[in-house]
Amino acid sequence: MSALIELSGVTKVFHEGRHNALVALEGIDLSIQEGRITVLKGPSGSGKTTLLAIIACLARPTSGRVRVAGEVVSNLPETFLAEVRRRTFGVVFQQFHLVAGLSALTNVMLPAYTTGRPHAEIARRAGALLDRLGLARLSGERVERLSGGEQQRVAIARALINDPPVVLADEPTANLDSALSADFLGILGGMRDEGRTVILSSHDPRVCEAPLVDHVVRLLDGKLAA
Amino acid sequence: MIFQKSILALLFASGVGAVGALAAGPHALAVWRHWDLESGSARQLRLERRSTLVSTGMALLLTVQSVALLLFVFNADRMASQFVGAMCAVGTLRVDGFGFPALLAQVAAFFGSSVWLTMNAVDGRCRDRPLTRARSALLLALIPVLLLAFGLELAFFLGLDANVITSCCGSLFSIQAPGVGGDLAALPPGQAMTATFLLLGGTAAVAARTVHRGQGGLALGVAGILAFAVALAGIVAFVSLYVYEDPHHHCPFCLLKPEYGYRGYAFYVPLLAATSAALAAAALAPFASARERGPASAGRVRSATRALAGVALGGFVLVLLLMAWQVASSGLKLLAHG
Amino acid sequence: MRNWISRQALLADYTLSALARRRGRNLALFTVYAGIVFVLASTMLFTHALRREAHALLAHSPEVLVQNLKAGRHAYLTQGDLDRLGRLRGVSRIEGRRWGYFFDPVFGATYTLMAPASESPGRGDLHVGDGVARVRGLSTGDTLALRSAAGELHVFTVKKVFSSESSLVAADLVLMHPADWEAFFQLPGGVFTDAALSVVNPLEVRSVARKIGERLPETRVILREEILRTYEALFDWREGLLLALASLAVAAFAILAWNQASGLSADERREIGILKAIGWDTRDVLTMKLWEGGLISGAAFSLGTLGAFVHVFHFEAALIVPVLKGWSVLYPRFVLTPSVDAVSLLTLGLLTVFPFTLATLVPAWRAAITDPDEVMRGTT
C-alpha cells in the first residue's frame, strides 16, 4: 500500500511575528496509508484539529510540505487548494456545521455547488445518500429541526456528496451517546469497505480503541509522540 | 460644462479607475517584491488573499474604463452641436488643447487595461500563478497612465466653453492641413489602399500562424501595432473618401456620426479588439515556454495565446473585409481615373 | 463553459435563497436603491424627451430669424424693412411672420396666435392645435370667443383641429387670417413680428447673418443653430446639475450599501465559514456575494427605470417638472413622446450599479477571506 497523504517537516504558526505567536504544530512527518482508518489522538490543545485542517487542505502550513496522491499541495494558491479539497476530501465537523434555514437536501448538495455539475444530478445523488443513511423522509426538513444524530448523518451525507476518496471527521463522537457512537463507527467501517481512506481526530477511548481502527497517531503539544 | 450626465459618468469612471489603481499600487509593489508561492508565511497568505480582491476590483474598474473609451468618443461627437464651428467629434476635441491628448491617453489606458485583464484571466487558470509578478508590474506601470488619462480628461471637460469658436475636421484632415492629419490625408489613396490591405492581410497571416502553433505572440504583437497604425492611416487616406463619397473629405471621426449609420464603430471596435488581443499575446509570449514553468501552465498559456491570436485574426480580417466592402460598394470611383 | 454556466446558476440559486432568508434587511436596501434609480432615470428620460421635442420643434423652423428692435426692445418689422433686406446671396426665401401670445384668463393658459402668409384660414375662421382644443373642449364647427386686450369680444369658428407628433410644437397654436390677427391685436396693417429666411447651405448662414447686420443695423438676427446650441446646453446643464445633486444621494447610498454589506451578522459569518470549509473557495464566495449585489442591482435598476418610464410618459413627470421644464408657457397638458436611448441607460448604469458594486466589493471580500479552518477551530 502506498502513502496517500505525506507530510514532511510541517509547522504551523498562528499570529506569526506578533507577541502572541503560537506554534500549533512543529516538524510533523507523517504518512497516511490509503484505504485505512487512522486516528489522530491527543488531549485538547495538542494540535489534532490543526493537523486535520492541514491534511484536509483547509489551511496551508507555515513551512513544510504536504503531498496528496503524490502531488505537492502546500504551495498551491487557494483556488486550486480548494479544488484539491473538493475532489479529495469530505469533512464531518465536530459541531456538524450545517447551514440553518436550509433543508437537509440542500445542505447535502452545497459542496457540489461550485463543481459546475448540473443541479439535477447533484440533487439525485444527495437524495440517494440521505436515503442510504435512513433520512429519506427528512430530506425536505430544515436542518435545525433535526435531532443531533440526524444532523450528524446529514453532515456525513454532505461529506460524501463529491464522492471523495478521503473522509475526515473531527471529534465525531463528542456529542453522541454510546449507541449513536457505535452506529457512527459502523458507518465508518462501511466507508472503508468502499475503499475510502478515513482519518479521525479523537480522544474518546471508544473510538481510539475500537477494533476497526488500523492506525493511531499520538500528538502532544504540537509534536508527534512516540 | 462639466454638469452633463455623460461627462459626469466619464469622469466618475475614469477617476475611480485611477484612484483604484493607485490604491492597489502598494499591494502590486509588495507582490513584485515578496511573492513566493512556495512559502506559507503569514505575509504570503496575506498577499494571496489581497490578490483576490485586487484582481476582482481592478477587473471591474478596467472593464468599465475600456467601455468608457467608446462613451468618450460618442460623447465628443454628440457634443459637437454645442460648439460653433464643430461638425463632429474633432470640433469638440479641439475646443481646448486637452481633447486629443485625453483621447490618446484613453487609448493607451485601453490597451494597457486589456492586456492586464487578459494576463489576470490567464494567471487565474494556472496553478503556479506564473504571471502574478508580471501583471503586478504592469499594474504599477498603468497607474501613471490612468492618472494622466483622468487628469487630461478633467482638464479637457473643465476647459469646454460654448463661446469658443472651434475648427471642424476639415482643417485637421485635409491635404492642405499641417501636421499628421494633413500628411495622412495627402497620401495617394491607391497606394495607401494597397499598403493597408497588404499589412492587414500580413498581420492576419501572422495571427493564423500563432493560432496554429500557439507561439510567436511577440511577432503578432509587433505586427498588430503596425496594422493598427496603418489601418488608422488607411481610414484617413482612403476609407473615409469612399464612405462620404467625396474625394476631399478625409475625417476619421465623421464616420462615427448617425448620418453614416455609426459605421465608424464597425471599423474601430474590431480594430481595437484585434490590436489589444495581439498585444496581450505578446505579453504572454515569455510565459509560453515550458522550461522554467510547469508544463501544465505553459500549456494553458499557449492555449490562451491561441485564443487571443484567433481574436486578432478575426478582428483584422473583419476590418479588412469591411474596408474592401466599403470601397466596392461606394458610389465614389477614385481609382478608375486616379 | 457548460460547467461555468452551471456553476454560476447554482451560485445564483444559492444567493436567491440566502436573500430570501434575510428578506427584511435586503428589502430596505432595495427600496432605497430603486428610489435613487427612479429619480435619476426620470431626470434622464425627461430631458432626453425634451431634447427630442426641441429638435422636432426646430426641424421645421427657418435657418435665420430677423427681429426688429427699437431702443433695444422688440418692435415690428414693416414691409419696407423686408424690401430693404432685398435679395441676399444664399437666401432662397424671405417671409414676414405674424404671431403673438394670448393669455386666456379663463383657463389660465397661453396660446400662440399666428397668421400664416399662405394657406391661412378664411376671415373669421380658426385652425387650433389639439392642446387648445382639449382645454376649451373644441371640435370642428364650434365657435370660440376670445376677449382681446382691448376688451372686445371676437367670435371665431373652428374649421380644423390639428395634431402633431410633438405636442410641444403645436399644442398651443391658433392660426387665423392676417386681417383678423391685426384686428385682434389692434396692430396697423402690414407689420410683421419677425422675418424668417431660408438658407440652404449651412456654411453660408454666418455670412448671411453678417450681411443682414450691415443692411438693417437695428435688427437682431437669430440663427437656428444658435437656438439649438442654447437648448442643448440648457437641457444638458439642468440635467447635469440635477444629476450632480443626485450623486450626493448616490454617495450616501453607496455608504449605506457598504455598511449593510460589511455589517455581516454572526449567522452570516458562520455560514460563509461553513461554505469555505466544505469546499468553496474565496472566489466562489466572492462570486456569490457579487451575485447578491447583481440580483439586487438588476431588480432595483429594472424597477426604477420602469417606474421612471411610467412617471415621465404617463404621469407627465409630475415630480421633477418644476425643476427641469422652466417653460414660460403654461401647458394645460404635457405628454411627451416615449423614447429611451441606450447612452442614457449606459450612463445610468455607470452612475448607480457601478458604485453599488464597488461599495459592496470590499466588504464581500472581507467576508470571503474567512479562514476555512476557523470553523474547525471553533472560533466562529
Image (cartoon, rainbow, N blue to C red):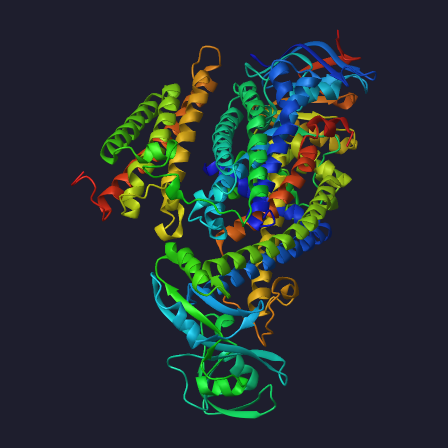
**Image spot of residue B172 (x, y percent):** 39, 39
Q: Is residue A84 placed above or below C301 in the rendered structure? A: above
> What quarter of the picture does the C terminus of chain A occupy?
top right
**Viewed as shown, does residue A193 lie left or right of C98?**
right
Q: Residue furthest top?
A: A226
Q: Residue furthest left?
A: B336
Residue at 63% x, 32% y is B20
- Image label count: 0
**Viewed as shown, does residue B82 lie left or right of B32?**
left
> What quarter of the picture does the N terminus of chain A occupy?
top right
Residue at 50% x, 56% y is C229
Residue at 78% x, 23% y is A204
Q: Is residue C69 placed above or below B171 in the rendered structure? A: below
**Image spot of residue B196 (x, y percent):** 28, 31
Is any part of residue A136 visible from this angle?
no
Question: Which is more toward the observer, B284 or B180?
Answer: B180
**Image spot of residue B52 (x, y percent):** 61, 29
**Image spot of residue B221 (x, y percent):** 39, 23
Residue at 38% x, 54% y is C203
Is any part of residue A7 visible from this angle?
yes
**Viewed as shown, does residue C189 lie left or right of B20?**
left
Question: Which is more toward the observer, C362 or C96?
Answer: C96
Q: Is residue A60 placed above or below B330 in the rendered structure? A: above
| Location of residue A208 by image quarter | top right
Question: Which is more toward the observer, B149 or A140?
Answer: B149
